[in-house]
Amino acid sequence: MDKFLDYFDSRHRELILNKPAGNDGPVITISRLTGCDARQVAENIVDTLNRKSGTSKWRWVDKDIIYAIAKELNTDTQRVESFYKGMELSNMSEMIMAFSGGFVSDLRVKKAIKDVVLSICKEGHIVIVGRGGVSIAHSITDSLHVRLIAPFYWRVENVMKKKEMDIEAAEEYVVDTDERRFNLITTFLDKKSLNIDYLFDVTINRQSFNVIEIADLVVLMYEKKIGRQLAERNESTQKF
């Protein structure tokens, strides 16, 4: 946790953000439709990579980012959460926060999120679940961007079991959360797009594979892609 909190120290973050781009990563981002068990997949990916490397350098992050950014901006976690969820603050809430000195604009929240997520990804050995990671880290060469999908009613049933919802509530939750996650990804793109498929190296149907199988597939694809890129860089260096 102490290492994680370093990313919210402005001096440490500035050092990472200004390092040569060729040293960025490696990073794996996982974007998902609602109900695809991305956190469990991320946990298994990290366990596998650490076991294979004989280290504990790989880790995964998700909601920890919200609390740390809120602390940095000296605002309530709900303010950061509202940005992630795409919720507008009411006029009354804005007025109360302004008078109390706690108001933080969307622009400041967005910049804090982008800087923190990018610094985490640039330093590397990270699996980041959601949080706009695929958009923010897309320029990092040593990266693998994964998308988890599944049929709508398969995901509804999964949400019903995990969150103990009835079918109507689960349907609404899946639709609303899918929309918010799509909007978050496009928020961090330089140009808005209705089609985000091009952002991903691979898309996996969660219905077709269990969590462990997906984690194993992601690790294999990560090793293939990063290994090939490293070999190409070494070959290019030897020519000069």
Image (cartoon, rainbow, N blue to C red):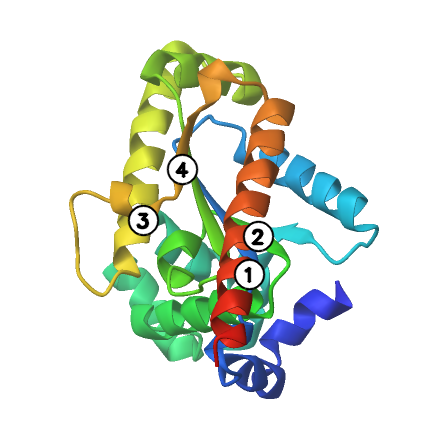
Mark nearer the N terminus (1 vs 3) = 3
Answer yes or no: do the residues labelled 4 and 1 have beta carbons within 8 Å? Answer: no
Answer yes or no: do the residues labelled 1 and 2 have beta carbons within 8 Å? Answer: yes
* Mark 2 lies on residue: 227
Q: Is 188 drawn above or below residue 30 in the view shown?
A: below
Disc 4: CA contacts within 10 A as few (<14), some (14-19) or many (>=20): some
Q: Nearer the viewer, residue 217 or 41?
A: 217
Q: Is 38 drawn above or below residue 133 in the view shown?
A: above
In this rendering, position of residue 167 left or right of residue 163:
left
Alpha-carbon span between mark 4 and mark 1: 20 Å
Q: Position of residue 190 (x, y in %)?
A: 22, 65
- Type of the residue with mark 3: Leu
Q: Which mark is residue 131?
A: none
Answer yes or no: do the residues labelled 4 and 3 have beta carbons within 8 Å? Answer: no
- Type of the residue with mark 2: Gly
* Mark 1 lies on residue: 230
Task: Look at the numbered disc 4 and give the secondary structure of its residue.
Answer: strand
Q: Position of residue 183 (x, y in %)?
A: 27, 48
Answer yes or no: do the residues labelled 3 and 2 have beta carbons within 8 Å? Answer: no
Note whether residue 200 is visible: yes
Indicate the quadrant where residue 138 lies: bottom left
Mark nearer the N terminus (3 vs 2) = 3
User: What is the count of numbered marks?
Assistant: 4
Q: Nearer the viewer, residue 151 or 67?
A: 151
Indicate the quadrant where residue 204 lies: top left
Q: What residue is drawn where x is 43% and y is 61%?
A: 137
Name, please, the residue furthest toward the right: 54
Disc 2: CA contacts within 10 A as few (<14), some (14-19) or many (>=20): few
Q: Which mark is residue 202?
A: 4
Alpha-carbon span between mark 3 and mark 2: 20 Å
* Mark 3 lies on residue: 199
- Type of the residue with mark 1: Leu
